[in-house]
Image: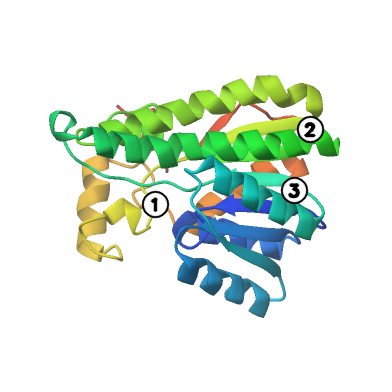
């Protein structure tokens, strides 16, 4: 029960990594607020957590809108008696070549993947400072934050910005005992990872993709494996770690 009596807010909590984090946090004793734009997904996640004996609050909201962020942070803080952990997980991926990427696409990806994390971190960071009991922020980034791939320029730039936001906030919030770290997943078996291929990763696609990437562990990760890393950084087990980006990529980031 590494998060016993803690309150956590997780964005993009309806599916994939976000849902895995929410379910793991709940099993570790946390009250979890689930934030996403799709109500059905977070309500399903909340129901699963409740069925397992946990406490979850689903809140439909758009993190790219500062007014909505302020509203749900105030609501969660009131219902949970504060917020101890923030997981900035929400993200979108819209692959296209750089010269064909429209301004609208750039703006949409940056608003969600980077500015959404800024809005949430600002509001919850202020709250954590006011609470005076420290806290933890974990940003779910990507190996795209330090590796580039053709057709992913908007995603690459947003994740690179998120990594630098992690470092900047770690320095600024350290005097308040608020730790800020990041997790950088590689190829994870989620719908986003195989966008345009299928909702679920097929064996054939997995084999081709892993072979092309040359992942040393020779397999993609399950969302639950990323959730374990997020839990570690959010818990007191990582009490002297801040400003760190932890790669969860099967060794991909150390290959050429």
Q: Are marks 2 and 3 in contact (CB under 8 Å)?
A: no
Q: Which residue is mark 2?
A: 129
Q: Are marks 1 and 3 in contact (CB under 8 Å)?
A: no
Q: Nearer the viewer, residue 164 or 148?
A: 164
Q: Position of residue 79 (x, y in %)?
A: 77, 60
In the rendered image, the quadrant that contains the C terminus is top left
Disc number for residue 188: 1
Q: Earlier in the sequence, mark 2 or mark 3?
A: 3
Marks 2 and 1: which is nearer the front? 2
Q: Position of residue 149 (x, y in %)?
A: 25, 33
Q: Is residue 165 above or below residue 228?
A: above
Q: Position of residue 147 (x, y in %)?
A: 34, 28
Task: Tell me the SS state at disc 1.
Answer: loop
Q: Is residue 2 visible?
A: no
Task: Tell me the SS state at disc 2.
Answer: helix
Disc number for residue 83: 3
Q: Is residue 67 visible?
A: yes
Locate residue 117 relative to residue 236 in the image: left or right: left
Q: Nearer the viewer, residue 256 or 100?
A: 100
The crowd level at tag 1 (other Cα within 10 Å; few <14, some 14-19, many 20+) is: many
The crowd level at tag 3 (other Cα within 10 Å; few <14, some 14-19, many 20+) is: many
């Amino acid at each position: 029960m590494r998060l016993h009596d803690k309150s956590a807010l997780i964005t993009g909590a309806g599916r994939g990594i976000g849902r895995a984090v929410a379910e793991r946090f709940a099993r570790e004793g946390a009250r979890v607020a689930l934030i996403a734009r799709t109500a059905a997904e977070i309500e399903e996640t909340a129901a699963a957590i409740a069925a397992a004996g946990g406490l979850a609050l689903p809140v439909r909201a758009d993190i790219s809108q500062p007014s909505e962020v302020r509203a749900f942070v105030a609501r969660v803080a009131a219902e949970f008696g504060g917020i101890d952990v923030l997981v900035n997980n929400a993200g979108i991926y819209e692959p296209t070549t750089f010269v064909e990427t429209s301004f609208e696409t750039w703006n949409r990806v940056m608003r969600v993947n980077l500015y959404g994390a800024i809005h949430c971190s600002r509001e919850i960071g202020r709250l954590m400072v006011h609470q005076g009991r420290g806290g933890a922020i974990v940003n779910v980034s990507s190996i795209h934050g330090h590796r580039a791939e053709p057709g992913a320029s908007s995603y690459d730039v947003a994740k690179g910005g998120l990594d630098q936001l992690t470092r900047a906030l770690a320095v600024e919030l350290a005097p308040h005992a608020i730790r800020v770290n990041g997790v950088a997943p590689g190829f994870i078996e989620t719908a986003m990872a195989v966008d345009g291929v299928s909702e679920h990763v097929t064996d054939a696609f997995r084999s081709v993709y892993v072979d092309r990437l040359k992942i040393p562990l020779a397999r993609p990760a399950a969302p639950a494996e990323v959730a374990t890393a997020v839990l570690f950084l959010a818990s007191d087990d990582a009490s002297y770690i801040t400003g760190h980006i932890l790669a969860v990529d099967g060794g991909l980031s150390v290959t050429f």
